[in-house]
Amino acid sequence: MSLQIWIWIIVGLTFALYIGIAIWSKAGSTNEFYIAGKGVNPIANGMATAADWMSAASFISMAGIISFIGYDGSVYLMGWTGGYVLLALLLAPYLRKFGKFTVPDFIGDRYYSNVARTVAVFCALIVSFTYIAGQMRGVGIVFSRYLEVDINSGVFIGMGIVLFYAILGGMKGITYTQVAQYCVLIFAFMVPAIFISIQMTGNPIPQLGFGSESTDGVYLLDKLNGLHQELGFSEYTSGSKSTLDVFLITAALMIGTAGLPHVIVRFFTVKKVSDARKSAGWALLFIAILYTTAPAIAVFARTNLIETVSEKDYSTMPYWFKKWEETGLLKYDDKNNDNIIQYLGDEQLNELTIDKDIMVLANPEIAQLPNWVIALLAAGAIAAALSTAAGLLLVISSSISHDLIKRIINPEISDKGELIAARVSAFFAVMLAGYFGINPPDFVAATVALAFGLAAASFFPAIVLGIFYKKMNKEGAISGMLIGILSMLFYMTKFKFGWFGGGSSEDWWFGISPEGFGTIAMLINLIVSITVANFTASPPEKIIKLVENIRLPSDDEEL
Amino acid sequence: MKNNKAEIYWKKNLRYLTILLSIWFLVSFGFGILLADQLNEIQFFGFKLGFWFAQQGSIYTFVILIFVYIFLMNRLDKFYRSKK
């Protein structure tokens, strides 16, 4: 069967599955719409969190990025997994014990202030919008690449599907579709990885494979380091970024992960506090399967690629080379007219430019796997993009219908009214996200990574201090959040968009990149919060009782 | 009696957090970043050890840490609920 038919069949089947689940899990109340009625099994919630978490970028681009930067790619691997330890130990169980619907709910109640709540809503919207715009674009790109439609039609199809199941099912619908999406995406990611690992090292487990000997008896990584040295690239297993920057970026990504509202809110959906801990563990386990495979794929793909193209005659290139050349993701420029491909570290002499996305997308073809595997990969990439977009959408809609309308503007609103408001705001959020997907502002790509810095600089200290520091008061939290997010916005706009005088990477303060600055902004927030709290009135007795209460396991839990 | 128990519960919880987060810091920021160059001198199967910690070992440790935490806290919860 031809590839295109396979893709339509497999992608079509997965769509039918998602829509079927949405109809089955229609939400009937705000409780179901925001937090799936608190009835989600912790393992299912772990899968849903993993799918929510892993975006099209994790699925398609991450292995490719690592493949080009080697050790430096570790910041993403450690940063996007280590945050779950912080989540599980410092946030999830306490927020679940607190037991409301959203992150601004916690901030507003803990800091007994609608100003704090409003600041939190504002932060949640900034973080989620920067993130979702990139996702809708990703949906469009994936659709266009696989379904042979243009990117805009791809965005429309994606919007339609997300709209249907997010508006109908709310958190409940999203959770159960995400469970299905996780299964699709992990299967799609692992199948080619396992095949290639067997081909290259004889070991079916990719995580072990890339530390094994390749077919010629040399350790694969030693061979790759050797190839890199020969061709003038920097050594694969050591970094070229400064240690300080690697440290700070990793920390910013970890802390940002723990502060992202669409991740935190997932822990409100389980039945009890102990389940919140459990689902954090399962979520990380499910994420780790992909995150430990990605660096293996990176090494396989890199070695495979160099061996296939380096110093080879252009006319002997396999079929996939020509095919990806047509898409523009692979470019060959025969600078010295010898018809032989020179792939070198030296920019002046190098003749081949390779887009990072190829490493995952072309992998099945490079390894000569059957068409259904490629179709599976398409379905997996689409699942990854849709699940993340849906999760973010829910945060945006609940921020508006619950935190703004119900808690601040019109507390008298009925549950039914609020549910309608939630669906209407989800609708407008999809439209807005779709608009950004079709007309991507230049800064989207730059800011997705920075969404983590923003989350780290705003939410993380406010929530952690709210739980672990009883004396923390509203004055401290509000000033901390504001100064934290503003300093992050300042540094990011200065060095990414050239505002406030701009500057290049040489002007970075102490060589700290904007991505790594999230850690510094988080520390600023922390220091400001604690200092201000010590000079202003202690929180009321009622709040201290609330903090004491969320620190303890609930009394009725085992019933 | 109840307050006393709550206090012990919280103190133990903080101790678990300190230990587990120290390990969390050690395997990632320690072995994976600050000491990576030194550890890279050591060969671990086909890997340089620092590189392995940065791209594999730290992630495995994170997963184990959360499951250890789940176990410890479930035990602590039981203690808190006993003889109430």
Image (cartoon, grey):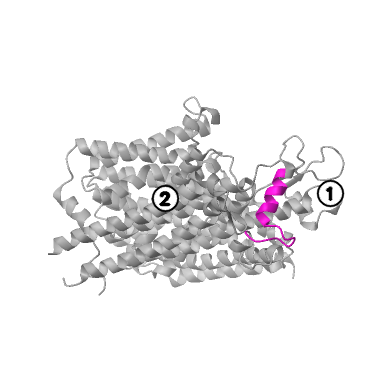
Q: Which mark is residue B21?
A: none
> Residue A167 versus residue A210: which sits nearer the camera?
A210
- Provide residue A44's location: percent of width, then percent of height: 44, 69
Name the kind of residue labelled 2 in the image: Phe
**Subunit of mark 1?**
A
Cβ atoms at labels 1 and 2 below 8 Å apart:
no
Image-quadrant location for residue A395: bottom left
Q: Over which residues does the magenta segment extend?
A: A211-229
In this view, the residue in front, A199 or A124, is A199
Return the residue at label 1.
A314
- Say above or below: A291 vs A128: below
Asked whether, in this view, residue A336 is left or right of residue A437, the answer is right
Q: What amino acid does circle 1 point to?
A: Tyr
Q: Are marks 1 and 2 on the same chain?
A: no
Residue A384: quadrant of the picture: bottom right
The residue carrying mark 2 is: B25
